[in-house]
């Protein structure tokens, strides 16, 4: 199979049929063999009913329905796991991403050897204050911390070589950083393509301000994971050694001073250095313990189920 189109969605009933027809049309006129995997992430409207109808009409349509809303990363994870195509293309369900981009994206992966190609909504049809500015800031920070030179990390329209999606683990809300996850996994040929962006036609935005807060926290996590995820002791051990040594130096100073120079002076517990020694040694030990725990967890990690599936269509 040439292409799997993976479409995570939440309450997009009005867009789905139009989106399906458009994609099917593009696929047929380019003679691609394909599947479209819709992942309904706990929609409360008629999205799943629409997907069921589409799958009866067109056997290329597959569907996964989550028991409740687990988030876009989990939906992508389920889509990636079931994708059978050589190239996997993700897109939003709200008709803001243009299916006409599919052939070019496919070619970039297939013939130009890209591991991943990310869409870049260079000209956006969104509000400047609530969306474009925060988005610029977010992308700048992501570029600086990750070293991946993309303008639009969070663009829903992306194309992947199948090896990439089968080998990265999208969890939490990490879908914003799939290019960083790919880079960390060793898929470093990451490209960018300017894509058409349309204003939302139907339904409502699921975009809220806490997305940005979560986005920045996730960025810190991913920076940490990429640097120290496989060797937590190197960070926590180093911090532990530094803190503990500072404490120890103060303790030795206090002890030597008390024993040899000032035996009849103030009690050690009445001196400020005592508290510095105490706290830094305790914190240092805590860092060490955190490092050890990290190493133990790393060695005992198992894949855990992150979502429950309510229904499936044409998934084997
Ligand atoms: N699986 C899943 N998909 C979601 C969730 N929230 C949004 N989506 C889908 O992700 C895509 C992007 O969401 P949008 O709300 O359109 O976000 P946006 O494009 O940044 O915002 P707008 O420009 O206002 O549309 C759409 O296809 C949504 O249906 C979710 O919780 N789970
Ligand atoms: Mg949208």
Image (tube, rainbow, N blue to C red):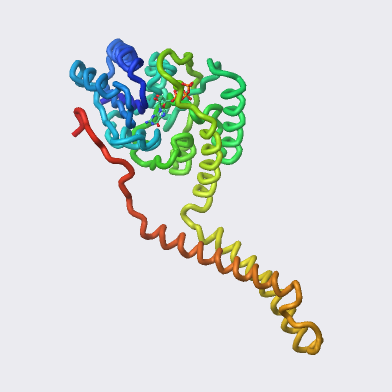
**Residue at screen point 68% across, 72% down:** 277
State the quadrant of the C terminus: top left
* Residue 165, above or below 9: below
Residue 51 in the image, given as x and y percentages of width and height: 26, 21
Q: Quadrant of ligand 2?
A: top left
**Residue at screen point 48% across, 32% down:** 190
Q: Nearer the viewer, residue 29 or 261?
A: 261
Q: Is residue 97 toward the left or the right of residue 262 in the image?
A: left
Q: Nearer the viewer, residue 85 or 291?
A: 291
Residue 250 in the image, given as x and y percentages of width and height: 72, 74
The answer to whether residue 65 shows anywhere in this view is yes
Residue 305 in the image, given as x and y percentages of width and height: 30, 46
* Residue 107, above or below 149: above
The answer to whether residue 164 shows anywhere in this view is no
**Residue at screen point 51% across, 46% down:** 221
Q: Nearer the viewer, residue 158 or 198?
A: 198
State the quadrant of the N terminus: top left
Residue 56 in the image, given as x and y percentages of width and height: 18, 19
Quadrant of res 171: top left
């Amino acid at each position: 199979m040439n292409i799997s189109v993976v479409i995570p969605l939440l309450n997009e009933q009005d867009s789905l049929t139009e989106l399906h027809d458009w994609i099917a049309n593009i696929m047929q006129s380019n003679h691609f063999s394909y599947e479209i995997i819709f992942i309904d992430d706990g929609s409360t409207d008629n999205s799943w009913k629409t997907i069921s109808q589409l799958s009866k009409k067109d056997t290329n349509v597959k569907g996964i329905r989550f028991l409740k809303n687990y988030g876009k990363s989990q939906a992508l994870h389920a889509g990636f796991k079931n994708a059978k195509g050589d190239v996997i293309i993700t897109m939003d369900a709200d008709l803001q991403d243009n299916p006409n981009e599919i052939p070019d994206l496919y070619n970039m992966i297939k013939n130009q050897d890209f591991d991943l190609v990310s869409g870049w909504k260079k000209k956006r049809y969104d509000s400047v204050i609530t969306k474009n500015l925060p988005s610029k800031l977010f992308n700048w920070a992501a570029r600086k911390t990750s070293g991946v030179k993309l303008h639009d990390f969070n663009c829903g329209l992306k194309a992947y070589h199948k090896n990439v999606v089968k080998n990265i683990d999208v969890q939490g809300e990490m879908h914003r950083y799939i290019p960083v996850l790919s880079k960390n996994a060793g898929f470093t040929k990451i490209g960018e393509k300017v894509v058409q962006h349309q204003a939302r036609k139907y339904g409502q935005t699921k975009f809220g301000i806490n997305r940005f807060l979560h986005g920045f926290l996730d960025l810190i996590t991913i920076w940490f994971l990429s640097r120290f995820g496989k060797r937590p002791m190197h960070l926590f051990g180093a911090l532990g050694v530094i803190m503990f040594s500072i404490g120890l130096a103060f303790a030795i100073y206090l002890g030597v001073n008390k024993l040899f120079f000032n035996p009849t002076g103030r009690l050690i517990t009445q001196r400020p250095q005592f508290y510095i020694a105490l706290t830094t040694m305790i914190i240092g030990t805590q860092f060490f313990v955190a490092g050890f725990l990290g190493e133990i967890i790393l060695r005992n990690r198992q894949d855990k189920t992150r979502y429950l599936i309510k229904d499936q269509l044409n998934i084997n």
